[in-house]
Image (spheres, rainbow, N blue to C red):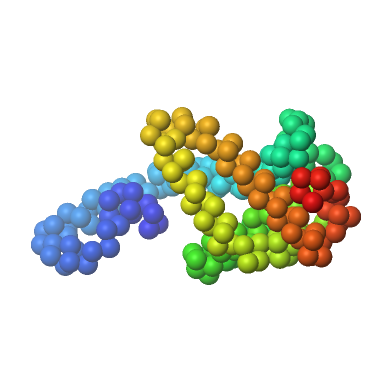
Amino acid sequence: MSLILIVLGEGSGIPSASQNLRSSDRYEWHNSVNSIDWGFLAPFLLVALFFIIIIVLVGIAFGILISSPLIVGAQRYFKRSAEGEVSMRNVGYAFNKDRYWAVVVTMLWRNFLLFLWFLLLIIPGIIKSYSYSQVPYILADNPHIGYSRAVDLSRQMTHGHKFRMFVLDLSFLGWVLLGLLALGVGVLFVQPYINATKAELYLDLRHNALAGGLTSEYELNVIETPYYK
């Protein structure tokens, strides 16, 4: 009802406005509100609310069931490209029936944790977004690693590197601004550079994690290329 009042221009919430109304104005205001046929509008408002709920639910379902596997597939494409294998088949990697639900559950768990951190405060949420940023890449290596292990390994891999990762993101700012100056079209050319750099970052963090004993080649289903040894 508060939303309806705001739409009708009655939701300003400024007490002085109503207190300064003359008695005649108040009388006319009450009459105008009472003259609205709420019984006539109710079905339309319910239909509108129903469609809003449906749109929100479809958006959430799309994000969980479609967007998450696509993110993992796209990150696998850039990661494998950095390793020397350029293939568009990697984009659909997570949609394989043997991997799909493992990827969906893990990404859902990561996003849920980020949601909780951002509810706490913005700064902790940003810090944790860096901590969990490697989860899609880890899933691109081993989708069956487990939702808890994927998040924990990402946290361990980024420990002590989050500020450097933040500085890396800042280094893209000039490129993004240049892209925006080109009527926004330039961003389309900058973004692949950013994605490729992030893939190289994961390979470097993965190398450090393997060297430090945080994980194993068996767990990540990888054998490092000579470039990263």
Q: Is residue 215 above or below residue 98?
A: below
Q: Residue at x 65, y 59 (%)?
A: 132
Figure quadrant of residue 30: bottom left
Residue most extreme to the bottom: 120
Residue drawn at the location 57% of the way across and 42% of the way down: 194
The quadrant where residue 128 appears: bottom right
Q: Residue 224, how many percent across, how many down?
A: 82, 48
Spot the residue most to the right: 218
Q: What residue do we see at 78% from left, 38% from top?
A: 93
Q: Nearer the viewer, residue 201 or 118?
A: 201
Q: Position of residue 96 (x, y in %)?
A: 82, 39
Task: Find residue 155 and report its horizontal and vertical position in percent.
Answer: 68, 64
Considering only vertical position in the picture, is 216 above or below 175?
Answer: below
Choose top left, top right, bottom left or bottom right for residue 112.
bottom right
Q: For residue 148, say whether it is visible.
A: no
Q: Could one spot residue 166 in this view of the protein?
A: yes
Left or right of 194 in this view: 144 = right
Which residue corresponds to the image point at 27% horizontal and 51% vertical from the top-left?
9
In front of the other: 192 or 102: 192
> Which quarter of the image is occupied by the N terminus?
bottom left
Left or right: where 118 falls relative to 113 = left
Q: Nearest the camera: 86 or 128?
A: 86
Residue 198 screen position, x and y as percent: 63, 47
